[in-house]
Every structure is written in structure tokens, then in C-alpha cells.
Image: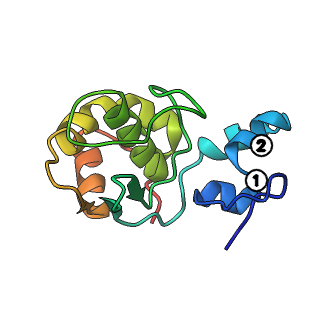
Amino acid sequence: MSKCCICKRILKNPISIELGIGPVCRAKENLQEEFDFMKVQAIKGFGDVHFSRNEDGEVVTNVPQRIFKHISFPNGGDMQWGYGGSGSSDFALNILSCYIGQTAAEIYYQEFKWDFIAGISEDSGVIKRDDVMHWLSEKGYKEEINP
């Protein structure tokens, strides 16, 4: 179990675990620049997207919430699915950034939200990597995609 090196709280986000510090402490310690560098990078070999809700209704996903574009950081809501609002937008952007980085994801995420995220009605599911890669290809994404 990884803990923040500053406040000793348990870290859940894979990026925070890798850095050894949580988002609130990064901001307090003025370490946001290092986080900003990491958030724009694709995650090499990122696989299928898994998402569910725990018994308290909280979102559980393997997608790290590295980008807070539509919901405020650090006190905003979770990434969500099943509607077309801000939580779904951030979920779509964070998913695509795992595959192709934030810069390219910014181009495609709103359409991806409508095609993959907004219409989900289940409390849990999987979005296959192959489906995302095929969708990106159909949308004209031509840069090298992480294997």
C-alpha cells in the first residue's frame, strides 16, 4: 500500500503512486509542474478500460484521473459515465489520454464521449482497447499508437 510522502494518506491514483505524493500535497508543495508533464503522456501498453461503482457508489476505474478539464481539481467530482456532462467529458479525455496523450486526446474526446461514455447505462463495464484503437483509426488518428 503506497502512502503520500507528505501527509501519509493512502494513494489510489496510479500516477500519485508512481510519484509518491497525492494531488493536494503536490499543489501545496508547488510540484504541479512535474504532474503536468506526466499527465500529457500516453501510458505505454495501457489495456482495456475497466469501470464500476463500489458499495458506496464511488467510481472505481483503472483510468487515472490525470486531467481535470471540466470538473475542478482537487475538490471536484469523479469521472462518470451515462450522461453527457462534465464527469463524462473528463472520463473520455482521461481515457483517450492514456492511449494517445493529452494533446491528441483533446481533439477526439468529445466525440468519444458521445460514442462510448454517455450512453453507458450499467454500473460497471469494460471498454476494449481494440475498440478504442479501431475508433481512433476510423476518426483519422494516424500517429503511432502505443503497442
Q: CA distance from mark 2 to mark 1?
A: 6 Å
* CB within 8 Å, label 2 to label 1: yes
Between 100 and 5, the one lying in front of the other is: 5
Q: Quadrant of residue 81?
A: top left
Residue pictured at 47% horizontal, 28% vertical: 71
- Would you call the spot at circle 1 few (<14 residues within 10 Å), some (14-19), or many (20 or more)? many
Residue 143 seen: no
Residue pictured at 70% horizontal, 68% vertical: 2
Q: Position of residue 131 (x, y in %)?
A: 23, 58
Query: As displayed, is residue 93 above or below residue 19?
Result: above
Is 61 situated left or right of 33 in this image?
left
Query: As displayed, is residue 3 above or below residue 7?
Result: below
Query: As displayed, is residue 38 above or below residue 43?
Result: above
Q: Amino acid at mark 2?
A: Cys
**What is the count of numbered marks?**
2
Is 79 situated left or right of 64 in this image?
left
Residue pictured at 43% horizontal, 30% vertical: 106
Q: Quadrant of residue 84?
A: top left
Q: Amino acid at mark 1?
A: Ile
Between 101 and 7, the one lying in front of the other is: 7
Q: Position of residue 8 (x, y in %)?
A: 78, 59
Residue pictured at 68% horizontal, 43% vertical: 23
Q: Position of residue 21 (x, y in %)?
A: 76, 53
Q: Quadrant of the N terminus?
A: bottom right
Q: Which mark is residue 21?
A: 1
- Would you call the spot at circle 2 few (<14 residues within 10 Å), some (14-19), or many (20 or more)? some
Element class at badge 1:
loop
Q: Which mark is residue 25?
A: 2
Q: Position of residue 5 (x, y in %)?
A: 83, 58
Q: Quadrant of the C terminus?
A: bottom left
Element class at badge 2:
helix
Residue 23 seen: yes
